[in-house]
């Protein structure tokens, strides 16, 4: 979930000051409403060291009524803490109905510290995360609103901040606990200098515990103004929508909540796609040379895949006219049709619509030793079906997790999954649409639907961004392919596939 | 979940014929309604070999419109089946909306066959069950009604049936597949003669996959009439209530379903408690001798518990005046108060009510090395709170799973859990109530509440039965203690505790 996060976002002090005022008033108001309605709220803050958590939390609690929240920070556990399941300590800290409990580090940090670097780390951590999921689900079922923030900074930013902190002579409070803990266990635990060692663990924790009822919000925290605004906005929106739920579901509550008329605020979610360098290109000569090289590699690798009884699933998604068809054509040119198949995915039939949406893809999943190439895929659920409102909001929101579980099952039986997003800009698309329309051999490729989709570019972009964040898992990542230059696009894809296969098949 | 099942229940042919007619008409009608409302239904049958599954399923499908259901039986998997995640084969068999899919053995049998007796069996099976839970949750979220039946017979009954089958020369169809599978793997797989080897695996599977949205119904199948009626009644009730849900939730469906006016049927759920032999008694001499013996044992064992850093949780539940207090008194007589504590549980305070119901028990959970004795416990949620309607139906139904998860977390850090149900009959209770009332030293013990509870004996009995079935897990079993004779009761408890501790602490 931390891949593809744009950490360059920033908000000027001036703009920050303007927005924060309104937000703080709104937040204070919402807190009082939540108290009246007895909505219990749990807010978890986790993040990299020196991600500015303390400062951000402080800016967040300033507008709150102190009688209405409890602040819990992770301290050096006393002996007694080690004598009970650690989750129980947190269980006893859940808020009374109507209050907000703020956790400055939480069960997540405790789980990582407890297991990181120790024997059977992965296995035990996994069990721990399962228990955390039980815990949060039980609370959510009981009406608790759970919000979880991960403050994300880059390694470089972290280093810079450490230097600054050292210069100022501020003690690293959490570091103290870890230092003692390290001594106690005689382990080489260094939370501060091991950003990259931690990354996979953090990724795993986020992936395994991102639940529809207790989702993670990744906060781009290189810029503190941006981080604070994002946190406060997320909290106000969540409380607002919970209040609406509670006051409108019949039979549950009767008090009608008055709309505060929230003012327009700066849109914080800039798109990962906008940062993609679409000027990338390669020469025709380079193209032909590389194409031959990788196609030959793939020809050999497909048999290795077959021998090793693995399977390969390649998913192509992308803008209309981004070159999916052409790419697939070059990919399969030298492959054996007894091993590969292309699965084109259009809109579902009536029968398909009358099943669970994943049902229609079962048939196309490759057997061991085989390759399936999906020209569009189950991701339609969170793209076209979301944007065109072909399914309910609740349905596409649930789908991220469902898709991750589905892919997880496939990976469990040896499948390699690669997901390509073919990215072009609006101008390139327009040019390609026009050229298709004027070419009688290609005009079948362009329909009214394509123009309709184009007109909803921004909505699709938001859907693509969320899809990247929620479904780019460690075992099944999304690869964004710069496709303004078709040649560049094709080579990148051939290269990624052969390199991944080589790695997975140990050749 | 298979413990405490009363397999002696039976229904005469005459009564069966009378009931089945009405039920079959009703079932046929409900199928048509479900079809109109496009409710997809999945019915899973699992069970011991020769539990009569084929016959019961047949009796079940007879009244159905053949156009409205699909029947899937587990067959010898072809090679292709082994080349995809096995769950996918079942995924592609889910019914179209409005239809019923009947699985004569299912993903559960496949999961067991796939892993039983093989390397890392437990670990792999667990992963498998997790995936199955994903699968069922996804379907349920999408509106599928999922019903799962486990046909339970005793080992003796199974043996008798095998003999009968052999005599009649009927081929064991499923046995055939297993035989081939056994040969293939060169393993000693014998589904037929290993009832007791299977039992813990079956228990695990049932426990781990008994979800509120896809619950297991254990069918007492020693008597076929009883089994068939129980199955059909469970299915009709589930469809009926789903239809009601679908037709009354606003905004979802508008068709109003007409009540079929279901006739009174024989009540099938006889109580485990009714079969308990309450005449058990011991002599006073035996009592004093045993009491001394076990109390001395426990005195030593408590220090062993402390040394080994384990903990012990003892729960006392039972009828009013069943002797909980007296029992606890004898239990702690020789224990060290620095190690044990008694946690009395009354009705929750206002603050406690304003938290998740498990919150108030966190404090009483013992630290490692310690013992907590709960005089009443979190089981109040599914007993008094259920019967007195102090919580919503949805809440106590969810609580079985929540309690199992909670206890699982405790066990994970080394806790030993023992749960005693002190059972007396109504007459004994009355006698004790009266004696309390007439004794000025004891009259404080009896309140109006006790008389009120007594008047709801049957409702409590049903709640206790369901509690046994849903929360008697392999690691934290319920022990029913015959307590008409107080002396017998006390010794049984002391004995069970010391024996369990000896076993767990390897002394």
Image (cartoon, coloured by chain):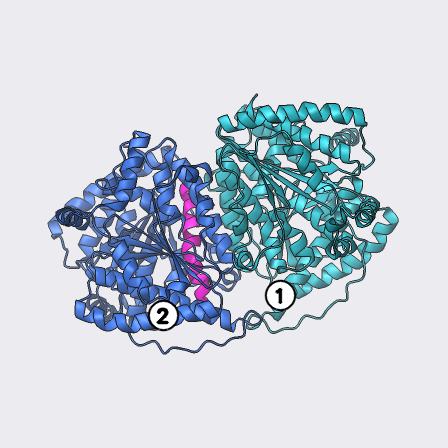
Chain colours: A blue, B cyan
Task: Tell me what residue is drawn at x 57 percent, y 61 percent.
Answer: B97
Q: How many marks?
A: 2
Nearer to the camera, A240 or B117: A240
Q: Categorize mark 1 by other alpha carbons within 10 Å: few (<14), some (14-19), many (20+).
A: some
What's the chain of the residue with tag 2?
Answer: A
Left or right: where A188 falls relative to B441? left
Q: Position of residue B475 (x, y in %)?
A: 58, 35
Task: Tell me what residue is drawn at x 15 percent, y 56 percent.
Answer: A280
Q: Are marks 2 and 1 on the same chain?
A: no
Q: Quadrant of residue B21?
A: bottom right
Task: Tell me what residue is drawn at x 37 percent, y 33 percent.
Answer: A308
Residue B46 seen by the camera: yes
Q: Position of residue A364 (x, y in %)?
A: 43, 50
The residues bearing labels 2 and 1 have C-alpha atoms spaced at a distance of 38 Å
Q: Nearer the viewer, mark 2 or mark 1?
A: 2
Label 2 belongs to which residue?
Answer: A28
Prevailing secondary structure class for the magenta stretch in the rendered image? helix
Asked if residue B365 lies in the magenta stretch, the reply is: no
Q: Position of residue B321 (x, y in %)?
A: 75, 45
Work out whether A372 lies above or below A450. Answer: above
Work out whether A275 lies above or below B343. Answer: below
Q: Secondary structure at mark 1?
A: helix
Q: Range of the magenta residues?
A: A388-414
Q: Categorize mark 2 by other alpha carbons within 10 Å: few (<14), some (14-19), many (20+).
A: some
Left or right: where B330 falls relative to A81? right
Label 1 belongs to which residue?
Answer: B245
Nearer to the camera, A320 or B461: B461
- Residue that protrudes farthest toward the top in the picture: B507
Left or right: where B128 falls relative to A468? right
What's the chain of the residue with tag 1?
Answer: B
């Amino acid at each position: 979930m931390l891949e593809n996060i744009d950490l360059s976002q920033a908000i000027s002090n001036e703009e920050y000051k303007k927005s924060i005022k309104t937000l703080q008033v709104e937040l204070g108001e919402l807190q009082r409403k939540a108290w009246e309605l007895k909505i219990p709220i749990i807010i978890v803050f986790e993040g990299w060291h020196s991600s500015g958590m303390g400062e951000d939390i402080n800016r967040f609690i300033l507008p709150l009524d102190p009688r209405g929240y409890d602040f819990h920070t992770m301290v050096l556990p006393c002996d007694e803490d080690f004598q009970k399941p650690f989750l129980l300590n947190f269980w006893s800290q859940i808020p009374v109905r109507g209050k907000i409990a703020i956790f400055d580090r939480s069960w997540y940090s405790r789980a990582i510290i407890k297991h990181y670097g120790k024997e059977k780390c992965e296995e035990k951590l996994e069990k721990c995360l399962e228990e955390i999921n039980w815990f949060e689900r039980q609370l959510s079922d009981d009406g608790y609103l759970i919000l979880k923030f991960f403050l994300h900074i880059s390694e470089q930013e972290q280093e810079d901040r450490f230097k600054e902190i050292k210069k100022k002579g501020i003690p690293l409070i959490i570091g103290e606990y870890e230092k003692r803990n390290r001594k106690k266990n005689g382990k080489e635990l260094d939370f501060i200098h091991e950003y990259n060692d931690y990354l996979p663990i953090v990724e795993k924790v986020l992936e395994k515990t991102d639940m529809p009822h207790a989702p993670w919000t990744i906060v781009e925290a290189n810029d503190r103004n941006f981080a604070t605004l994002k946190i406060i906005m997320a909290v106000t929106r969540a409380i607002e929508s919970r209040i609406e739920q509670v006051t409108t579901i019949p039979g549950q509550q009767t008090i009608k909540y008055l709309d505060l008329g929230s003012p327009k605020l700066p849109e914080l979610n800039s798109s990962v796609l906008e940062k993609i360098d679409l000027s990338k290109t390669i020469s025709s000569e380079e193209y032909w040379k590389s194409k031959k090289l990788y196609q030959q590699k793939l020809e050999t690798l497909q048999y290795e895949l077959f021998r090793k009884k693995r399977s390969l699933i390649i998913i192509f998604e992308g803008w209309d006219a981004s070159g999916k068809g052409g790419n697939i054509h070059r990919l399969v040119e030298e492959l054996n049709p007894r091993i590969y198949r292309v699965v084109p995915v259009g809109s579902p039939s009536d029968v398909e619509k009358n099943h669970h949406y994943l049902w229609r893809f079962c048939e196309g999943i490759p057997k061991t030793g085989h390759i399936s190439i999906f020209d569009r895929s189950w991701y339609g659920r969170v793209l076209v079906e979301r944007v065109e409102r072909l399914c309910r909001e609740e349905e596409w929101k649930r789908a991220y997790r469902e898709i991750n579980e589905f892919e997880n099952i496939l990976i469990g039986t040896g499948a390699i999954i690669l997901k390509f997003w073919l990215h072009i800009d609006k101008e390139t698309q327009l040019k390609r649409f026009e050229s298709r329309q004027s070419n009688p051999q290609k005009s079948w490729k362009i329909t009214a639907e394509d123009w309709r989709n184009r007109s909803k570019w921004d909505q699709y972009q938001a859907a693509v961004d969320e899809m990247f964040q929620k479904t780019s898992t460690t075992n099944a990542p999304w690869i964004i392919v710069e496709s303004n230059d078709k040649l560049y696009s094709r080579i990148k894809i051939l290269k990624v596939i052969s390199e991944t296969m080589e790695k997975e098949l140990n050749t």
